[in-house]
Amino acid sequence: MPTYEEHKSQVDKNYEFFNQKLPSLIGRYNHQFVLLKDKKIIEIFETKTDAIKAGHLKFTDAFSVQEIVDFGCYSRMGGITPEA
């Protein structure tokens, strides 16, 4: 099972990938939510809740959800919690 740090690394890589793709997404998908995994866009959703639910259904480890906006983003790391 991947460690918390491995999951965080995955999410960080997804975030970098998302920032590279953001300019091409804003016009068409502004204020929608993108599900990312392994530096790939998996699917785009109308709501954050739908994107997070899909991430939990499709993956047992880390995934990312980002809001497509031109002034910032929402980021969520799913699939693991920090070790105590």
Image (spheres, rainbow, N blue to C red):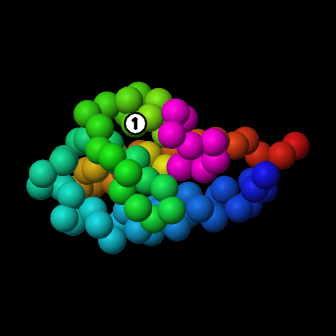
Give the tally of numbered discs: 1
Left-right relation of 6 to 36: right
Left-right relation of 47 to 23: right
**What is the magenta range?**
56-63
Packing grade of label 1 (10 A; few <14, some 14-19, many >=20) is many
Q: Which image quadrant for residue 10?
A: bottom right
| Image spot of residue 29 (x, y percent) | 18, 48
Residue 77 appearing in the image: no
Looking at the image, which residue sits at the far left?
27
| Image spot of residue 44 (x, y percent) | 29, 44
| Image spot of residue 5 (x, y percent) | 73, 60
Q: Amino acid at mark 1?
A: Ala
| Image spot of residue 12 (x, y percent) | 55, 63
Q: Quadrant of the C terminus?
A: top right
Depth check, front residue: 21 or 42: 42
Left-right relation of 17 to 4: left
Residue ID at (21%, 65%)? 23
Residue 33 appearing in the image: yes
5 falls in the magenta region: no
Q: What residue sits right under mark 1 in the picture?
A: 51
Residue ID at (18%, 55%)? 26
Residue ID at (36%, 66%)? 19
Q: Which image quadrant for residue 70?
A: bottom left
Seen in the picture, residue 70 relative to 55 is either above or below; the reply is: below
Depth check, front residue: 57 or 47: 57
The local secondary structure at tag 1 comes to: helix
